[in-house]
Image (cartoon, grey):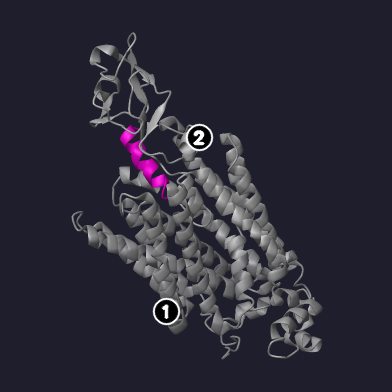
Amino acid sequence: MNENSLDTLLSKIGEFGRYQIRVITLLLLVIAFSCSIPECDEDVLDLKPAWWTNAIPSISNEPAKCSRFKSIGNINGTNCSSIDFDKNILLACDEYIYETSERSILQDFNLHCDENLWKLTTVGTLNSIGSLIGLPLIGILSDKYGRKTILINSILLCAISGLIRSFVNSYIFYMVMVFVDSFFNAATYTTAFTLAVEFISPKQRVIVVSLISLFYAFGGVITGTVAWLLQSWRPLLQILYGVQLLIVTYYWLLPESVRWLLIKERYLEAQKILNDIGREKQFNVPLQTLKDLQAPVDQLVDAADVNTTLKQFFKSFALTTRLINCIFCWIVAVFVYQGLTINSVALSTNTYFDFILTVLIEVPGALATFFVMKTFGRRFTLCFSFFMCSICCISFIFIPQDLYWLRLCIYLLGKCFSAMDFSVMYAITTEMFPTPLRNLLLSVCSMFARTGSMIAPHIPLLELIWKPLPLILFGITSLMSGVLCLKFPETKDVKLPDTIDESISIGTKKEITRCNT
């Protein structure tokens, strides 16, 4: 691989991410650098001094980043001439100079040059592996021990590992902490999403989905702004992860999922939470009422046994095929979202502004998700967003390079629709599966989706075969998902299923009565 290809890949690696990978995006910030020639009193910010052709090999009329000519004798002053270097002997660079004073892990762990490229890409890959392992395990624990308990402890452990990572000086130890961080952080979003959805009525679920997406986007803007102000990876981690320690207060502020408590037959705890909620309106919920609201005991006798419930789940051909279809659509949603980010056009010369802008485009996506889902339902919204994302990806290929603003608009539209299908996937996955397995199956889908995030960083290599190939791949897979998602049942205004039978009946003639509240 030549150094021009290296520059291209490095710049695209710096765009990689979602969830805590948004932080990794800024940690992997690739700062322009060049080989340092200590013998020549060079300006620390001048990557192309007047004498560079005498001391550094030229690659496409640009100074090589990782090699230099051997110096001959003692060199004094700044006028390094060609006679001061032997151009027949190439040496690897020992020191580097940088275009700005920004600090990323590139400098602190010496990740320059071609031979260290794998160390940069491994950060994102190891993060995905940690998520791949953590998602199903955290999902199982959440269904067994409760949404609140696992959510708070996961975020707390994630915060501790992130803070430790900000102080390490070893690349190996840093990578260990990346894995630990991603392991605990993997299911925090899915668990929080499940907890929120289980607390509200069917009519309000679309609002919650949109609000979560909005606040997620605002969180990304805050992350980009803090990084812009600090421009150094260690204090960035310390601030972002230090704030997460406040999650301890949620032990007293956040109630457990009432629906989960009812499934576990912990009626007294559910009664206390509902009475606390209803205190302002001066009503109490009788204990017997909670028991009557729950499904018959004979349907729930095995609800607490995850293994038994899973066996019942996979005995249903309809639910099994629905899960497989859901997993595929999840993989495509993650793959296209992150692929569009990595292969994005250069929006400006400011990396931080680019980061903030690509996050902000998700705000109109969240608002559009709210109105379309509320009016047309989940299935239509998901199909529409996948199809529109496909159209944007394919049409982008045919727009001339000189039509910058048109290309920019099409790109942002594609990213917007990609964010939309991501949000709807969370909603419809949560609403299709029964309460005892809801968080587990949501985590399993998200886990398989990590294969999309693991593949996405390598997509730029396809441009070496044919430049439009990545966008064609994004367009085709989005189109396929748009067709397949039509097989999902419509869950708009449907009561969340608590049992296997209720989950099967969604979308059939025995469909659960839709709520009008």
Which of the image's four quarters has the N terminus? top left
At horizontal 37% and vertical 50% (from top left) the residue drawn is: 351
Identify the amino acid type marked 1. Val
Going from the N terminus, do you reach mark 2 or mark 1 first?
A: 2
At horizontal 58% and vertical 34% (from top left) the residue drawn is: 169
Q: Which residues are magenta?
A: 1-16
Q: Position of residue 2 (x, y in %)?
A: 33, 32
Does 106 sit left or right of 41 as displayed?
right
Does 28 sit left or right of 243 as displayed?
left
- Depicted 399 relative to depicted 82: above or below: below
- On whether residue 90 falls in the magenta region, the answer is no
Q: Position of residue 210 (x, y in %)?
A: 49, 73
Which residue is denoted by mark 2 in the rendering? 108
- Depicted 355 relative to depicted 9: above or below: below
Which residue is denoted by mark 1 in the rendering? 372
Majority secondary structure in the magenta region? helix
At horizontal 57% and vertical 83% (from top left) the residue drawn is: 202
Q: Position of residue 401 (x, y in %)?
A: 21, 54
- Depicted 219 relative to depicted 294: above or below: above
- On whether residue 13 falls in the magenta region, the answer is yes
Q: Position of residue 441 (x, y in %)?
A: 62, 65
Mark 2 crowdedness (10 Å alpha carbons): few <14, some 14-19, many ≥20: few
At horizontal 51% and vertical 78% (from top left) the residue drawn is: 206
Does 436 sit left or right of 317 as displayed?
right
Q: Nearer the viewer, residue 217 or 395?
A: 217
Residue 385 can be seen, yes or no: yes
